[in-house]
Image: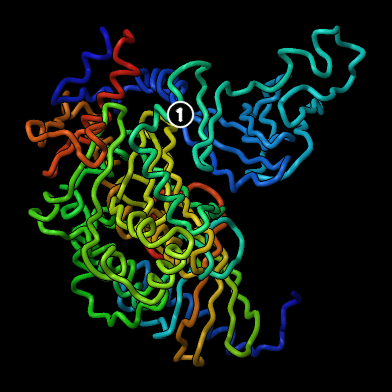
Amino acid sequence: MSPDTSFDLELQEAVRQFLYLEARLLDSRDWTGWLDLFDESATYFIPLGGEDYDPETGPALLYEDKALLRLRVTRLGHPRAYALDPQPVTTHAITNVSLARKKPNLEVSSLLSFHQFRDGEELFLTARLRHLLAGGPGAFKILRKTVFLTNAGGWHSVMSVPL
Amino acid sequence: MKLSHLVKDRKIHHRLYSDPEIFELEMEHIFGRIWLFIAHESQLPEKGDFCLARMGRTEVLVVRQKDGGIKVLKNSCSHRGTRLCAAPHGHTGAFVCPYHNWAFNLDGSLKALPHAQSYDDKVCPGAADMGLAEIPRVAVYRGFIFASMAAAGPSLEAHLGPLAAAIDNLVERAPNSELTICRQKTSLVYQGNWKFHHENANDTIHPSIVHESSVNSARTTPVDMADFRADNGQTKGMMLANGLPPQDWAKISLSGSELGHSFMGGFYRSGLLSSAHEDDVAKAYRTALEKAKGKQKASDILAMDRFNNLIWPNFNVNAQFHQIRVVHPLRHNRTLVEGYCFRLGGAPDEIFRRASRFLTALVSPTSMIFGDDMEIFERVQKGLGSDGIEWLDMSRGLSMEAPDDSTDGQMIASETASELPIRSQMQAWTQYMGDLEI
């Protein structure tokens, strides 16, 4: 796929800032602020095994709609979520942001470098992100977020913080 | 000192979890002898199909032979020991080593090698002892392939004992009695001893404590059931179920066998997951099952309401939700848990979708439920590793056991939230390990 360079720079910058905002909300543990970025019809998918597939046709590392994300966010803030006590400190670094297509919805590709430190243990993950966005600059909502982990086909330790 | 001194009626010595030397002995005397689940037949439908599997720390090739049989071969070249095959599964006519091109037939015999003129007749195609090391015993129980590194020992049926019924039930739940394993598996590693997994899986006191955060989140988050489009509320039901009050957990029966196996009764009391609940999908599925097997048989199959069927030392069958887990010891303080789900032949697609969602919600590394179990395992390992206590206690319910009628007395049952499953696992451990000296 050769990149379409016809997108205007303003739109590109707005998208980039939106992804930075998402990363910032996650790193500051503003879970409800993060949830608000998702459209009511949104899905969040982390495939298993390194290939893209329809999440309706098999298990996943994670496949949730906004209703399930609501439960997840409540747990993230729950004082007895042992896997989050002590709280993880994280860095979500976003790079290589590019607009893949504009219609019917804006599709954005980016790279994520994730570093977590918690209770003396470190976790590093990288992934390619695909965001499908509704709305426009200043009012983007995530319709679909897919996280293609570099090690989707490997072994994983517990992943408590959303990527 | 004999290792049997480390397991008493009500106590387990911490070295069973924290001592690398004991772990080495477990690999040799338990995982090096006992029947281990390695693959499902649906992974190898055609001659020449193969997949990689683990037996303890040993990597093996499971290979469908030309005659339709199955052989299990160590994945190490007989020349220099090089790891032969790196593909997790595939189809081939031969295995060729990437180092010096030694080639092996599907049955493991040496097929060809370069510079043959430089070898004497001890090293030539077909030479005895120059093939891949073959795992001596392989047996298939209703599509589930097991292997044992011991040349002699109890049969697979004898090993499975009363827990064969759990595999039967999983198979019978498919209207055409055919299962297909889903290749997408979860692979979760925790920094703790392998025995923690089975000790925890049928422990009915921990759920309302360890899983309080997910129980509570499911209870308090205001969401319309209709909004759970991804899984129709199944995950929420799983989260809520762990919040049974103590008196209800105490009513869930537990059964254990001296073989190390155990199972617990079902605990999904309401919603999509309860066996009493029937929506359109469940009804279509029941109809398909009745058509294939008759009304009475179908009813009997669906009536088996059990959660974790633990086959010692490392296999877990959840027949009701078409899942299995395999626990692989990596080090004394490091363990891999693989989770798989199955497609039931002749059942509606939606049934597989539900099994997929179940696996994702329960044993994925992102699970809101299992994540807290893993954290606890790691905390136990840390506590024991720092010489925190000498003996662990497993006496809960010790005096409240009785023969289990549902298995014709082959197992012991407890109608209280007993640590009976752990005691059963320790009985088996002692049988394999007790006479060894350390």
- Residue B92 rendering spot, x and y as whole percentages: 76, 41
Dividing the picture into quarters, in which one does residue A90 lie? bottom left
Q: Nearer the viewer, residue B385 or B115?
A: B115
> Which residue appears farthest toward the right when viewing the image?
B117
Q: Amino acid at mark 1?
A: Leu
How crowded pointer 1 is (Cα within 10 Å; few <14, some 14-19, many 20+) is rated as many
In the rendered image, the vertical position of residue A14 relative to residue B122, given as above or below = below
- Residue B95 rendering spot, x and y as whole percentages: 75, 33
Residue drawn 27% across the image and 67% down it:
B237
Residue drawn 21% across the image and 13% down it:
B5
Q: Is residue A126 visible?
A: no
Q: Nearer the viewer, residue B142 or A37?
A: B142
Q: What subunit carries mark 1?
A: B
Dividing the picture into quarters, in which one does residue A120 lie? top left
In the rendered image, the vertical position of residue A84 relative to residue B128, given as above or below = below
Work out which quarter of the rendered image holds the C terminus of chain B and state it: top left
Horizontal relation, residue B142 to residue B236: left or right: right
Residue drawn 45% across the image and 76% down it:
A43
Work out which quarter of the rendered image holds the N terminus of chain B and state it: top left
- Residue B104 rendering spot, x and y as whole percentages: 77, 27
Pointer 1: what residue? B156
